[in-house]
Amino acid sequence: MTEQNPPHVPEHARTPAPELENVEDAAVELPLGMRVAAAWSWRLIVVGVAVAALLWLIVQVRIIVIPVIIAILFTALLHPIVAAFERRGWPRELGVVTALVTFVASVTLLITLIVTQLRRGLGDVTMRSTQAWDDFLHWLETAFGVSAAQVNGYIDQFMHTIDEHQSEIWTGALAITTTAGQVITGSLLALFSLIFLLIDGKRIWYWVLGFLPARAHAPADAAGVAGWASVGQYVRVQIFVAFVDAVGIGVGAAILGVPLAVPIAILVFLGSFIPFLGAITTGALAVFVALVYNGPITAIIMFGIVILVNQVEGHVLQPLVMGNAVSVHPLGVVLAVSAGALLAGIPGALFAVPLAAAASAIVNTLNERRWDPDRDPVAEYLKRQKVHRLAKHRARRAARIEPRGGTA
C-alpha cells in the first residue's frame, strides 16, 4: 500500500490559535458606531457645560451685559455715519457727534409723537373702552345668560392668579428689575458704551484680541469682522422691515378712519424689532382701537390688514430680505426668538436674532478658514498706530519749529 502525502494546509490555517485574552478583547470591542457616538457625547457634554457656565456668568452680570449689547446694536446702526465722515477725510469726532445727534433726535421725535398723540386721545379711549365693555357684558347676558357679576368674578380670579405669579411672568433669566436706579444706571452705561465704541471701537477690539495667543489673532479677527458685519446688516434690514410693518398697519388704520393711527404706527415700528411677535402684539392694539371706535366690522377688516402685513413680513421680507442679508433661515429666526423669549424674556427675544446671525457668520468663517494664517492683525494694527503717532508728533514738532525759522 503506497503512502499518501498529507493534504496541503494553507498558510493562514497553520497559524496558531489566538491567546484567550485576545479573544476576550475582541469579544468586548465596541462597534464603530458606538465608539463614534461615545466620542461625540463627551465632547458635546464639555461644550454644554461651557455654554451653561457662560450663561450663568451672563445672568450674574446681566445689569452690565444688557446695556453693552444694546450699545453694540446701536453702534452697528450708527457706524456707517462715522465711516462716511472718515472716507471723506473729515474728523472722526465730528462723525461721532453727528451720529449721536441724529440718534437722539430720532428717538426724541418718536417719543414726542407718541406722547402728544396719546395724550389727546387717551381719555376718549378709556371712556369708549368702558362703554364697549358694558355693551359686551350686556350682550353676554342677553345671548348666553351669563351675568356681569360672574364675568367680573372670573376676571378678578384671573388677575389674582397673575398677581400671585407676577415674579415668574415678568422676571426672566436676563430681565432687569425695573427700579429707577437700575434703569438710570443701565441707560448711562449703554450711552457711555455707545460713545466709546463709536470713537475707539477698533482699538477696543484689538485690545481684546491681544489676550489671545498670536496664532489665534488672524482667525479670531476674521470671525469677529464677519460677525460684526452680520450684526450691522441685521440692524439695518430690521429697520426696513419695521418701517414696512408700521407703514402698512398705519396706512390701513388711517384709511379705515381708526383714530390714533400715528402712535399705532410708531408702536408697530418699535415693536417690530422683536421679530414675528412684536408686530402681532402692537397690531392687536390697532384692532382693539378699531373695535372700540368703529365697531366690529372695521375691527375685522383691521385684523385682516394686520394679518396681511405680517404675512408679507413672514413670507417675503424675512425670507428674502432678512435671509439674504443675515444668512439665517426663517425657521432659525423663529426658533431663536422662541428660545430667547423662553430663556430670557423680552431681552432674549430682542437679542436672539442678531446673536444667531453673528454666531452663524463666525462659525462659517472658521469652518471655511477665510483668513490669512501668515498675518497678525494685532501686530499690524499696533504698527500702524505707532507710525500714526510718530507722524503726528513730527507734525506738531514742525509746527512749533516753523515760526521760529520764519522770524529768524
Image: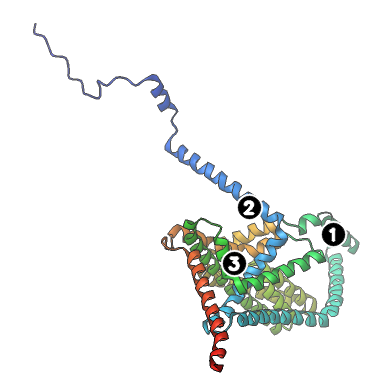
Vertical arrangement, residue 121 with respect to residue 280, above or below: below
Viewer-closest of 145 and 192:
192
**Residue 337's spot in the image, x, y percent?**
63, 61
The residue indicated by pointer 3 is 204
Distance Cα–Cα, label 2 vs label 3: 21 Å
Q: Residue furthest right?
A: 149
**Residue 196's spot in the image, x, y percent?**
64, 71
Q: Quadrant of residue 117?
A: bottom right
- Is disc 2 in contact with disc 3, using a CB cutoff of under 8 Å? no
Vertical arrangement, residue 309 with respect to residue 146, above or below: below
**Residue 216's spot in the image, x, y percent?**
49, 57
| Of callouts 2 and 1, the N-terminal one | 2
Total numbered badges shown on the rendered structure: 3
Identify the residue shown where x is 57% and y is 71%. Answer: 232
Colouring mode (rainbow / by chain / secondary structure / one colour): rainbow
| Of callouts 1 and 3, the N-terminal one | 1
Locate residue 256 relative to residue 320 in the image: left or right.
right
Viewer-closest of 368 and 137:
368
Q: Residue furthest left?
A: 2
Query: What amino acid type should be assigned to the residue bearing mark 1?
Result: Met
The residue indicated by pointer 1 is 159
Q: Give the class, few, some or many, for how many residues have Cα within 10 Å of label 1's Cα (few <14, many ≥20).
A: few
The residue indicated by pointer 2 is 54
Q: Residue furthest top?
A: 1
| Of callouts 2 and 3, the N-terminal one | 2
Q: Give the class, few, some or many, for how many residues have Cα within 10 Å of label 2's Cα (few <14, many ≥20).
A: few
